[in-house]
Image (tube, rainbow, N blue to C red):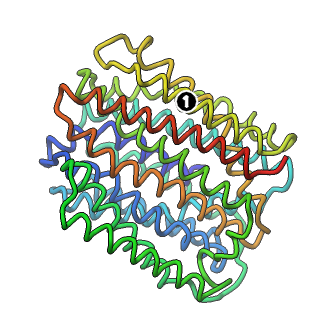
Amino acid sequence: MLASSLAFIDGSVTNVALPAIGRDLGGGAAELPWTINAYLLPLSALLLLGGAAGDHYGRRRMLILGIAIFTLASIGCALTASLEMLFACRVLQGAGAALLMPNSLGILGSSFEGEARGRAVGTWAAAGAIASAIGPPLGGWLVDTVGWRAIFYLNIPVALLAVIIAGRYVAESAEGKEALDWRGALLATAGLGALTWALTLWSSHHGASLQIWFGLGIGLALLLGFILTERHLGNRAMMPLILFASRPFVGLSLLTFFLYGALGGLLVLLPYLLIVGGGYSPTQAGFALLPFSVVIGAASRLAGRLTGKIGSRWPLTLGPIVTGLGFALLTRADPQASYWTSIFPGMAIIALGMAGAVAPLTTAVLSSVDDRHTGTASGFNSAIARTGGLIATALAGAVIAAADGALLGAFQFAAIVAAVFAVLAGVIAYATLGE
């Protein structure tokens, strides 16, 4: 839980620091989304490899290695003197998170069964939500009082404690010594990178150019190469294509992509809207996100227990639909109006819907494979979630680039798109999951 919290804290804290980073390092609408995407890109593309590495070479070993890489990169982020160096360190952070996240869940999945697994995953999700809740207010306060660089030092004590506990109390587990799918990992990383670069450029410039079309074409070609490589490798691939013969697995993957894509865009854009459009301080913007994480933290354990008793179909149907209703309420958002009437209702309902979906989704994924592949399965699902957020953040540049008078309208349109995606995720769950 401590290891996973590193990734949760980092994601939520950085969102409230974007305006301050832009002022200090000279980033504009075309560059600022890369503060997020430079982290999400390797995280999305390497999660599969990180999960498979844990399955093959030991989940505890890969967990500790990921924590070490993440922590060193965090120190680099704090010491950076340029936007380019910040991006490079964020890439290393993403690579470290790609090792630690699937293996923390892999350890959890292989340690519990049945209803106990649902409770354990609910507790894990609640801990992540609490970390996410602490991150924005604390990070905003640090940005206001010390400076944005201090937010990256938050990771050091958490990382040290996680390594000590993992070394002393977590048993090692490994399933084999087969070669890892490095070619697939490189193709996935390069393909997602090209697509993200092209989408970020398109959204910040409000138009398509030959350069953008070239990036999209290269990205799609590389991802096609990735699929062909995985097909050729069969069961030795980091993403075995035979998994897609399962209707529930396909449904869970699509649900994850749409739901977390919608959520990822919101968590980037709402703090930016409040700070730039409403004059909020980073601390105030951090507290504005607090209801989201508090509700998830309070309800996730209950949702995990409920899933163990009734199954995942109804929680994963109703949770995303309720989340979509919350996004729809944010079309009334006005950063100049009262937070309690304009922002809070939508945030509270989004949080309630996500609380009903996070633990059931994770439990459903872990229960869909045998113990030997829990790391790979959790890595794949996390990769889909981060890819959705990656694409949403790339497209968020269109809102960030909007002039002051158009910022609110652009945000409200993004909220409509997010609502449609969330409701679609719920419909997919109902259509593809069994009773």
Q: In this view, does 67 lie above or below 259?
A: below
Front position in the image: 291 or 28: 28
Residue 322 pos. (x, y %): 62, 29
Residue at 66% across, 65% down = 377
Front position in the image: 373 or 270: 270
Q: In this view, does 360 lie above or below 296?
A: below
Residue 32 pos. (x, y %): 24, 48
Residue 342, quarter of picture: top left
Residue 212 pos. (x, y %): 24, 63
Q: In this view, does 214 lie above or below 282?
A: below
Q: In this view, does 429 lie to the left or right of 157?
A: right
User: How many dots with numbers?
Assistant: 1
**Could you classify mark 1 by the number of other residues whose Cα lies within 10 Å: few (under 14), some (14-19), or many (20 or more)?**
many
Q: In this view, does 178 lie above or below 78?
A: below
Residue at 77% across, 45% down = 312
Q: Is mark 1 on a helix, strand or loop?
A: helix
Extreme residue toward the left, this view: 26
Q: Is residue 283 left or right of residue 46?
A: left
Residue at 40% across, 77% down = 222
Residue 161 pos. (x, y %): 54, 52
Residue 102, quarter of picture: bottom right
Q: Is residue 51 left or right of residue 275?
A: right
Residue 137, quarter of picture: top left
Q: In this view, does 92 lie to the left or right of 420?
A: left
Report the residue marked by disc 1. Answer: 350
Residue at 67% across, 74% down = 55
Of the residues shown, which amino acid type is indicated by label 1? Ile
